Image (tube, grey):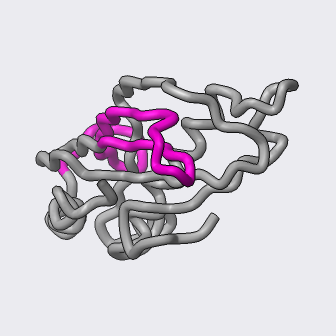
Amino acid sequence: MTNSEPHGRIDVRVYFEDTDTSGIVYHASYLRFIERGRTELLRSFGGGHRAMLESADPIAYAVRRMTLSFDRPARVDDLLVVETNVVEVTGARLIMDQRVLDQAGQVLFSAHVEIACLSPGGKPRRMPEAARAGFAAFIGAGAS
């Protein structure tokens, strides 16, 4: 996996472990691919999950809701692009649209993701202002 832009876009290679016995990407593998996309977006503006948990005002994020669409299959050895776009940032949640595309730019998979901000103990909480501002800076600036 490599970053192909400073934010919102990463490349992911399909390995055999990502596929079913016919060499087609298993549906749950797309969830791992888009998780990587969200993590790399977070890393691009100030660190990853460890930095958030070890900060003076620790936070964590959890997926609250997803709407998924499986449009075309990907296969073993394909190089895919995962795009992550921030759609909305509120006090305690994020809304993101994510897509997995093939090298020709065809959409293979898409997800509309609602993410809740949590304390390390798992209780809902407001996002620190710095985190909210960091995500807000990516609204409309993602990979579309």
127, above or below 30, in the image: below
For residue 137, side relative to residue 40 (left or right): left
7, above or below 139, in the image: below
Residue 87 in the magenta stretch? The answer is: no
For residue 46, side relative to residue 28 (left or right): left
> Residue at left 80%, top 27%?
20
For residue 16, side relative to residue 63 (left or right): right
49, above or below 69, in the image: below
> Which image quadrant is residue 93 in?
top left
Residue 121 in the magenta stretch? The answer is: yes
The N terminus sits in image quarter: bottom right
Q: Position of residue 66 (x, y in %)?
A: 38, 27
> Residue at left 33%, top 74%?
45
> Which image quadrant is residue 51 in?
bottom left
| Residue at the right extreme of this rendering | 21
> Residue at left 47%, top 54%?
37
**Residue range (magenta):** 97-126
Q: Position of residue 136 (x, y in %)?
A: 16, 60
The C terminus sits in image quarter: bottom left
> Residue at left 69%, top 55%?
13
Q: Residue 100 or 55: which is nearer the viewer?
A: 100
Q: Position of residue 128 (x, y in %)?
A: 20, 61
For residue 25, side relative to residue 33 (left or right): right
Q: Position of residue 22 (x, y in %)?
A: 84, 25
